[in-house]
Image: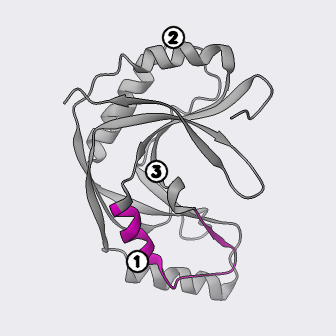
Amino acid sequence: MQSKSGSQRLFCAVEIPESAKVLIAEASKGFSAHGIAFVQSNNIHLTLLFLGDVANDSIASIRSKLKLVRFNGFDVRLIGFDTFSKTKPGVVFCRVAGGKDELGSLRGKIIAALGDIPISGMDKGGFSAHATIARIRRLDTDSAQNLGAFLDKNKNTELGTFRVSSFVLKSSALTGEGPIYSDVETFNAER
């Protein structure tokens, strides 16, 4: 999917299995608040690294470098919902309770593999493993209270444990209805 002429908006992610998405949907059922837009279930994932707008002629090199990333499969456990900021939250996400170190290590290997490719939009900053389930545009007082009650009620809700046996290079096309994600290539664990 094209984001700018001659480029694609790319990121590396771990897919979340349907079983965990069902638990996320069940836990968030009935919650709504003005100014909060839920991510479509098929779009929920764990972002490892955002690459930004990448020139189409660089994508083959990126794919080749990502094939060099070696990692063993590991388990990830999702538990509860949270926001990064209590005063001006931008997203609601599922917390990663198990597998944080392994996700961080995989991210580091991806960054190292891509090291000599000039990617101006690559986000090498801090990493906090999470799966975004909703984006917050604005909150009125009632919506903020509803969000706070939802987070308190679900802070320890089990949302699934799953095996990470691959990561995916994904393309994102932004639309008025939300992003449309496409898989560019999947990279499997050694074992």
Q: How far separated are the C-alphas under marks 2 and 1? A: 43 Å
Q: Determine crowd level at label 3: few under 14, some 14-19, many 20+ residues with C-alpha closer than 10 A.
A: some
Q: Amino acid at mark 2?
A: Asp
> Does residue 63 sit above or below 169 in this rendering?
above
Residue 33 magenta-highlighted: yes
Marks 3, 2: nearer the viewer: 3
- Label annotation for residue 116: 2
Residue at disc 2, secondary structure: loop
Looking at the rendered image, the quarter that the C terminus falls into is top left
Tell me which amino acid carries mark 1: Ala
Q: Position of residue 119 (x, y in %)?
A: 61, 21
Q: Secondary structure at mark 1?
A: helix
Which of pointers 3 and 1 lies earlier in the amino acid sequence?
1
Give the image location of residue 187, x and y in percent: 38, 28
What is the CA distance from the residue labelled 3 to the residue labelled 1?
Answer: 17 Å
Marker disc for residue 45:
3
Judge from the rendering whether residue 8 lies leftward or rightward of residue 40; answer left or right. right
**Amino acid type at image mark 3:** His
Name the residue carrying label 1.
27
Crowd rating for badge 1 (residues with CA inside 10 Å; few <14, some 14–19, many 20+): some
Vertical order, 66 against 137 (above or below): above
Farthest-out residue, left: 191
Q: Picture quarter containing residue 85?
A: bottom right
Tell me if label 3 and label 2 are in contact, CB under 8 Å.
no
Residue nearer the viewer, 53 or 56: 56
> Of residues 126 and 81, which is closer to you in this image?
81
Looking at the image, residue 109 sits to the left or right of residue 47; the answer is left
Q: Nearer the viewer, mark 2 or mark 1?
A: 1
The boundaries of the magenta stretch are 19-39
Mark 2 vs 1: CB contact within 8 A: no
